[in-house]
Protein backbone atom coordinates (compact mmCIF):
# COMPACT_ATOMS: atom_id res chain seq x y z
CA UNK A 1 0.00 0.00 0.00
CA UNK A 2 1.17 3.53 -0.57
CA UNK A 3 2.35 5.04 2.69
CA UNK A 4 3.48 1.69 4.15
CA UNK A 5 7.18 0.99 4.49
CA UNK A 6 9.47 -1.39 6.29
CA UNK A 7 11.10 0.28 9.27
CA UNK A 8 13.23 -2.71 10.23
CA UNK A 9 13.63 -6.44 10.40
CA UNK A 10 14.93 -7.32 13.86
CA UNK A 11 17.39 -10.07 14.71
CA UNK A 12 14.51 -12.03 16.29
CA UNK A 13 12.81 -12.21 12.88
CA UNK A 14 10.18 -9.58 13.61
CA UNK A 15 9.24 -7.05 10.97
CA UNK A 16 8.31 -3.51 11.88
CA UNK A 17 6.14 -1.59 9.42
CA UNK A 18 5.40 2.12 9.44
CA UNK A 19 2.19 3.41 7.90
CA UNK A 20 0.88 6.90 7.29
CA UNK A 21 -2.72 6.97 8.52
CA UNK A 22 -5.41 9.62 8.91
CA UNK A 23 -4.34 9.89 12.57
CA UNK A 24 -0.64 10.18 11.79
CA UNK A 25 2.17 7.69 11.66
CA UNK A 26 1.47 4.19 13.02
CA UNK A 27 3.88 1.31 13.69
CA UNK A 28 2.99 -2.35 13.28
CA UNK A 29 5.04 -5.32 14.42
CA UNK A 30 4.83 -8.71 12.72
CA UNK A 31 6.20 -11.93 14.19
CA UNK A 32 8.67 -14.17 12.36
CA UNK A 33 5.98 -16.12 10.49
CA UNK A 34 4.35 -12.96 9.18
CA UNK A 35 7.80 -11.60 8.31
CA UNK A 36 8.45 -14.69 6.17
CA UNK A 37 5.10 -14.20 4.44
CA UNK A 38 5.84 -10.52 3.78
CA UNK A 39 9.26 -11.31 2.33
CA UNK A 40 7.93 -14.20 0.21
CA UNK A 41 5.25 -11.96 -1.29
CA UNK A 42 7.73 -9.16 -1.96
CA UNK A 43 10.27 -11.52 -3.55
CA UNK A 44 7.56 -12.95 -5.82
CA UNK A 45 6.00 -9.59 -6.78
CA UNK A 46 2.86 -10.29 -4.78
CA UNK A 47 2.17 -13.66 -6.40
CA UNK A 48 0.50 -15.69 -3.63
CA UNK A 49 0.98 -19.05 -5.38
CA UNK A 50 4.73 -18.57 -5.75
CA UNK A 51 4.98 -17.20 -2.20
CA UNK A 52 3.03 -20.17 -0.81
CA UNK A 53 5.30 -22.65 -2.59
CA UNK A 54 8.47 -21.14 -1.18
CA UNK A 55 6.91 -20.95 2.30
CA UNK A 56 5.78 -24.59 2.05
CA UNK A 57 9.36 -25.59 1.22
CA UNK A 58 10.71 -23.59 4.17
CA UNK A 59 8.10 -24.89 6.59
CA UNK A 60 8.05 -28.48 5.25
CA UNK A 61 4.32 -28.38 4.76
CA UNK A 62 1.81 -28.81 1.96
CA UNK A 63 1.59 -25.79 -0.39
CA UNK A 64 -2.19 -25.77 0.01
CA UNK A 65 -1.81 -25.30 3.77
CA UNK A 66 0.79 -22.57 3.26
CA UNK A 67 -1.50 -20.82 0.77
CA UNK A 68 -4.41 -20.96 3.24
CA UNK A 69 -2.27 -19.46 6.02
CA UNK A 70 -1.02 -16.81 3.61
CA UNK A 71 -4.55 -15.89 2.53
CA UNK A 72 -5.69 -15.49 6.14
CA UNK A 73 -2.70 -13.27 6.91
CA UNK A 74 -3.19 -11.17 3.77
CA UNK A 75 -6.82 -10.61 4.76
CA UNK A 76 -5.74 -9.47 8.24
CA UNK A 77 -3.13 -7.13 6.73
CA UNK A 78 -5.71 -5.77 4.28
CA UNK A 79 -8.19 -5.16 7.10
CA UNK A 80 -5.45 -3.20 8.90
CA UNK A 81 -4.87 -1.10 5.76
CA UNK A 82 -1.33 -2.38 5.27
CA UNK A 83 -1.85 -4.34 2.07
CA UNK A 84 -4.34 -4.67 -0.76
CA UNK A 85 -5.09 -7.46 -3.17
CA UNK A 86 -4.70 -6.61 -6.83
CA UNK A 87 -5.94 -8.71 -9.73
Image (cartoon, helix red, strand yellow):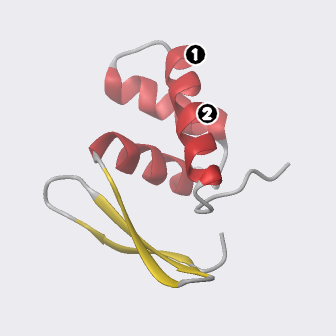
The answer to whether residue 32 is above or below residue 29 is above
Q: Position of residue 42 (x, y in %)?
A: 54, 57
Q: Secondary structure at mark 2?
A: helix
C-alpha gap between disc 2 and disc 1 = 10 Å
Residue placed furthest toward the bottom: 24
* Front one among 65 and 27: 27
User: Which label sits on residue 75?
Assistant: none
Residue placed furthest toward the front: 23
Q: Quadrant of the N terminus?
A: bottom right
Q: Position of residue 75 (x, y in %)?
A: 63, 41
The residue depicted at 40 percent of the width and 15 percent of the height is 61
The residue depicted at 19 percent of the width and 64 percent of the height is 10
Q: Earlier in the sequence, mark 2 or mark 1?
A: 1
Q: Tell which tag, 2 or 1, sits nearer the viewer.
A: 2
Q: Secondary structure at mark 1?
A: helix
User: In this image, 86 relative to 11: left or right?
Assistant: right
The answer to whether residue 6 is above or below residue 58 is below
Residue that carries the numbered disc 2 in the rendered image: 71
Q: Position of residue 45 (x, y in %)?
A: 64, 55
Q: Quadrant of residue 14?
A: bottom left
Residue that carries the numbered disc 1 in the rendered image: 64
* Front one among 38 and 25: 25
Residue placed furthest toward the left: 11
Q: Position of residue 20 (x, y in %)?
A: 55, 82
The residue depicted at 63 percent of the width and 82 percent of the height is 22
* Front one among 24 and 85: 24
Q: Label 1 near label 2: C-beta < 8 Å?
A: no
The residue depicted at 47 percent of the width and 33 percent of the height is 54
Check disc 2: other Cα within 10 Å, few if <14, some if 14-19, many if 20+: some
Amino acid sequence: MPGVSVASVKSDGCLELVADTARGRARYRCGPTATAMWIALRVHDGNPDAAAHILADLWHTDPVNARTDLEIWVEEMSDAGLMRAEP
